[in-house]
Image (spheres, rainbow, N blue to C red):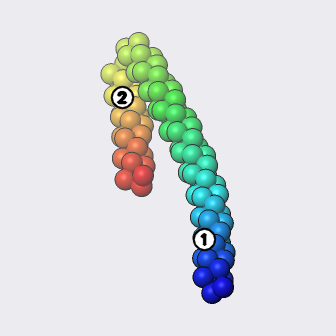
Amino acid sequence: MSSVKLSDAKLKEGSRKVQEAEEAQKVLKINRSTDSDSEMHRLKMMSIRFILVVLALVIILALTYYVSILNSSAVNAMGFSIIGAVVGALISYLLTKTKKL
């Protein structure tokens, strides 16, 4: 009789542990989906940054071409210094962003 009670107690404890494991697995699945969503968001943000950097470089190249068309050396110097400042700011921004990641 006591062995039957003991086996019933073990069975109840085992079923309780199975339920706890199933609940933990559900929580783990939720965390995985959240991680996947944050990973997708991070990838989207990185692709948007990449597109913006490429667009900025195209604009800088267009400005360089426009400034090089002008013949005045003062205008050329001023234009290239502005372009250099923009490129420096862009590089500084990108370097500070990569440190935070």
Whether residue 78 is visible to the viewer of this picture, yes or no, is: no
Residue at the spot x=60%, y=58% of the render?
Answer: 25
Answer left or right for 36 relative to 76. Answer: right
Q: Are marks 1 and 2 in contact (CB under 8 Å)?
A: no
Q: Position of residue 72 (x, y in %)?
A: 37, 19
The kind of residue tagged 1 is: Gly
With respect to residue 83, does 29 lie above or below? below
- Determine the residue positioned at 48% across, 32% down: 50
Residue at horizontal 63 percent and vertical 61 percent from the top: 22
Within the image, what quadrant is residue 17 found in? Answer: bottom right
- Along the line of sight, the residue nearer the viewer: 73 or 28: 28
Q: Which mark is residue 80?
A: 2
Residue 38 left/right relative to 19? left
Where is 14 relative to 67, above or below? below
User: Closer to the camera, 70 or 89?
Assistant: 89
Displayed quadrant of residue 48: top right
The residue sitting at the bottom extreme is 2
Disc 2 marks a residue whose amino acid type is Phe
- State the image coordinates of residue 38 (x, y, percent, origin top left): 57, 48
Front residue (pair 60, 47) = 47
Measuring 52% from the left and 39% from the top, which residue is drawn there?
A: 43
The front one of 6 and 27 is: 6
Say which element carries label 1.
helix
Q: Regarding mark 2 in the picture, which secondary structure is present there?
A: helix
Mark 1 lies on residue: 14
Q: Residues within 10 Å of mark 1 (few under 14, many from 20)?
A: few
In percent of width and height, residue 79 lies at 40, 28
